[in-house]
Amino acid sequence: MTDEHAMQRELEQVDAMIAELRSQANQIRQEVGNREDGPGDPGDTTLLISSAEEQEALVAVLEDRRGKLRERLGLGAEG
């Protein structure tokens, strides 16, 4: 496997991880906002919000990695 092929595979994996983490963060935030039983336990709500923020922080790290991979592949940082 060439370096370029390996980087392309990694880019695909990073894209998939970004999509999954964004989806998870959105689901968590919807769960917090759509509680039918009221606001719930503040500790639980804080934990859920922290979890969503952690997911979003991971997305930022992965987006940086994706940009670097795209640059190395000659695709430009955005895509």
Image (cartoon, grey):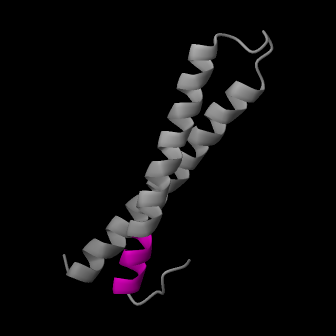
Q: Position of residue 57 (x, y in %)?
A: 47, 50
Q: Is residue 9 magenta?
A: no
User: Does the segment drawn in magenta span residue 70?
Assistant: yes
Name the magenta segment's main secondary structure. Answer: helix
- Res 42 quadrant in image: top right
Q: Residue at x 65, y 41 (%)?
A: 26
Residue 31, percent across and down? 69, 26
Quarter of the C terminus within the rendering: bottom right
Which residue is drawn at the image coordinates 69% and 26% (left, top)?
32
Q: Which residue is found at the position 40% from the left and 84% from the top?
A: 71
Which of the image's four quarters has the N terminus?
bottom left
Establish if 35 lies above or below 15.
above
Q: Is residue 26 left or right of residue 52?
A: right
Residue 52 falls left or right of residue 10: right
Residue occupying the point 26% across, 72% down: 6
Q: Position of residue 48 (x, y in %)?
A: 57, 26
Residue 29 position (above or below residue 14): above
Give the magenta range.
66-72
